[in-house]
Amino acid sequence: SFFSNQNDVCINESVTFNSNSSGNINSYSWQFYGGTPSTAVGPGPHNVSYNSSGSFDVILTVDGTNGESISTQNNYINVGQNQVELDFLPDCYGVETAWALQNENGEIIKEVDYGYYPGGDNAQDMDPNPNNIVENWCLMDGCYTFTVYDSYGDGMNGANPEYQCGQDGDYTIYGDNSEVLVELTSPNSDFGSEITHNFCVESDAPQASWNCVNNACLDPGDGSGEYNSLQ
């Protein structure tokens, strides 16, 4: 088996792989589909860069005294070509706020749970001067759902005169060229218990395509992302 330092990266970013196989092992053979280099030997660490977007398999074959063992992780590395920025300003009661980003398959790919942002749920524990927090993502072409939750049920309406906060929360998601993909438009930032936004991103960057037989593919080495069968 093996592990890496990250699974979701931008185009041209590197991932470091290591084996955590145990026992008397004589050899290690790696296959990094979509990566450069596309193969390696030894337990690692191996630094692999990805210059095409898509989801890529990684295979590690180890040979030891007990024979050969193959560990395959399908779609293990996700390479996004769309750089997206979330600017998120919580209200004074940040502990009440959470959010999640889902892809078209309903899988959560980014999330923040309750308690991540500073500020308790009362006047004594609130953060009187909340700061804007920036998250940078690299997303593959497709459509996404961004949902923000509030456990108190008043959105991020911190400026409500009944509270001592005096500041509403806010957020915006920007795409390429500062294009606004998502923004909070609820009056007084009061969206109740949750609010959902849908947006799509698309880039001209190359996406990998596959024409492989039995997981046997050749990397053309030209950055085109066109992988061909060995057969």
Image (spheres, rainbow, N blue to C red):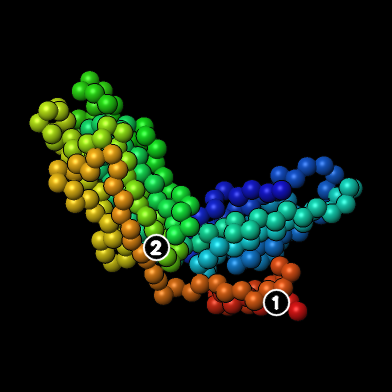
| Mark toward the start of the polypeptide (1 vs 2) | 2
Q: Residue at x 43, y 49 (%)?
A: 110
Q: Amino acid at mark 1?
A: Ser
Do callouts 1 and 2 mark residues in contact (Cβ within 8 Å)? no
Residue 67 place in picture, x, y as percent: 88, 52
Residue 208 place in picture, x, y as percent: 55, 72
Q: Residue at x 78, y 42 (%)?
A: 22
Q: Which mark is residue 229?
A: 1
Q: Extreme right residue here? A: 65
Q: Amino acid at mark 2?
A: Cys
Secondary structure beneath label 2: strand
- Please state the total of marks drawn on the protein image: 2
Of residues 2 and 142, which is closer to you in this image?
142
Which quadrant: the C terminus? bottom right
Query: Does residue 169 show up?
Result: no
Q: Which mark is residue 143?
A: 2
Q: In the shown orientation, is residue 220 left or right of residue 213?
A: left
Secondary structure beneath label 1: strand
Measure the C-alpha gap from mark 1 to mark 2. 30 Å
Of residues 13 and 93, which is closer to you in this image?
93
Q: Quadrant of residue 68?
A: bottom right
Judged by depth in the image, the label closer to the viewer, 1 or 2, is 2
